[in-house]
Amino acid sequence: MNNTATATSSVGQKKLEDPLAYLPCSTIVEYRKGQNIQSQGLPSRGICLVLAGKVKVCRQADNGRQVVVDIYRPDEFFGESALLGLSQSTEVSMALEDTKVMTWTAEAIEEIATRTPQLAIALLQLFVQRAIEFTSRIESFSTDNIARRLVRALIRFSERLGHQTEDGSVQSMAFTHELLSQYVGTSREIVTHYMNQFRTQGYVRYSRRGTMVYTDALKEWLRQDTADKVGKSPLTDVPGADGDTDARAILSPAKARAAA
Amino acid sequence: MNNTATATSSVGQKKLEDPLAYLPCSTIVEYRKGQNIQSQGLPSRGICLVLAGKVKVCRQADNGRQVVVDIYRPDEFFGESALLGLSQSTEVSMALEDTKVMTWTAEAIEEIATRTPQLAIALLQLFVQRAIEFTSRIESFSTDNIARRLVRALIRFSERLGHQTEDGSVQSMAFTHELLSQYVGTSREIVTHYMNQFRTQGYVRYSRRGTMVYTDALKEWLRQDTADKVGKSPLTDVPGADGDTDARAILSPAKARAAA
């Protein structure tokens, strides 16, 4: 781990504090791909830092469906509800790959933060930022139809979890249609319907190495689609109420990839 | 303000720190009902504490629609994005009543927190809790139809902003259908449609004094509706895709209020 207290990460307009600069090492636990890290309703495992691999964090809805909160990558924290001292975790987390996690109890974090206030400020900035990202997703749920939510998910996961390739696409682990449906809030079948269209139109490719997403082309698609919709009456364009099989939203924008 | 360092608020299983116990007084600004406190795209006004009144915090979507993030009441904070030093606010805030707000710059908060780490821990717990509440709302957007989202909004706003009356209802400020639609993520017309049904069925009453909500009856309605839906195929029950005019979900549960 980085032990210098000067490390910062640049987000927005200001150098933010980096919690990793202030945290001493702690217990490391390894999980195999597919293994549960935290089960809902069980006592929290504490605040966790991904050292290697990827972790899917979900909530389990009343009706049994899983909702993906996010996917966390190395140097990112999850399990922060431990800081509230809840006796039961509100979340489920699972290793998406073979994963190494370092954990701290809430008491340990509070004790270190009392000695090193920069740690508390760094974590505060981190979770304020996370809360704002959640409100951005709430905005998307409130105003975007399923195609737009799926496009935003593909862009976000690619930028967070993938790497740029020579042909301009971003290559990531395979995004299963089930995973995407649990993030976008619809059925797997509807995700498959749209993903087939995106593939036909060249926005997405699958290979043995994972999912390749043309993120620039999809961002252009979002911009075109927004421009088409501005000024429309909310009643004729209620999010999620457009039948979800209407391909117009996908078919009408210029094929940005061809133009790119 | 409370200046004792022993004040705590109980949430979950643990006494959480109370930021108000550690914050010195700062500038107070008054806003008239309807006045903007923070405009989107302008420099942030800093971290704000509501002293009196109520504040609506929104995000403005690309298509111009407003999405309500939350309504904040006395002793609650908003404007936390100031802690990230963003040069432009991602939020709009407005006084829903005549309101008094105390503000601190991010630098002031960081300076106080460095001297008083308990403040940083208190704010950290607060924003972790807020982030978890946002994921709960994301879960609702992912799995609930509009009627259920509206019921959850009525319960939440009543419990946060209202007070119990003798007949078992919770009386709050008037929740306009526009406000509810901006929180639930649908059109005002669809909210009006459901609110008329809820009123006919006795779950909600309007008066000159505000909105009266039978929260216990609505919680029972949610439980019944969940029990009805468990086991249904996701394809036949896609959230937001149920036509949004199907009254079945409202009409079928036992009239919990009559039974209460």
Image: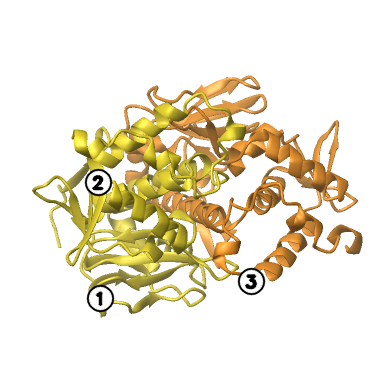
Chain colours: A orange, B yellow
Q: The residue tagged with tag 2: helix, strand or loop? A: strand
- Three-letter amino acid code at the position of disc 2: Glu
Do the numbered discs 1 and 2 sit on residues whose CB atoms are within 8 Å? no
Task: Read off the chain for label 1.
Answer: B
Q: How crowded is mark 1: few (under 14 residues within 10 Å), some or many (20 or more)?
A: few
Do the numbered discs 3 and 1 sit on residues whose CB atoms are within 8 Å? no
Mark 3 vs mark 2, CA separation in Å: 45 Å
One can see residue A48 in this view: yes
Residue B95 vs B241, above or below: the answer is below
Do the numbered discs 3 and 2 sit on residues whose CB atoms are within 8 Å? no
Q: Position of residue A69 (x, y in %)?
A: 53, 40
Quarter of the image with the N terminus of chain B in it: bottom left
Residue B228 vs A72, above or below: the answer is above
- Position of A173 with respect to B76 (left or right) is right
Q: Position of residue A226 (x, y in %)?
A: 67, 66
Does mark 1 fall on the same chain as mark 3? no
Residue carrying label 1: B27
Q: The residue tagged with tag 3: helix, strand or loop? A: loop
Q: How crowded is mark 3: few (under 14 residues within 10 Å), some or many (20 or more)?
A: few
Task: Read off the chain for label 3.
Answer: A
- Three-letter amino acid code at the position of disc 1: Thr
Disc marking residue B17: 2
> Which of the pair A99/B156 is nearer the observer?
B156
Disc marking residue A230: 3
Q: Looking at the image, which residue is at 85% across and 48% down?
A: A165
Task: Read off the chain for label 2.
Answer: B
Q: Looking at the image, which residue is at 36% across and 38% down?
A: A83
Res B63 → quadrant: bottom right
> Which of the pair B61/B76 is nearer the observer?
B61
Residue A65 vs B30, above or below: the answer is above
- Three-letter amino acid code at the position of disc 3: Val
Q: The residue tagged with tag 1: helix, strand or loop? A: strand
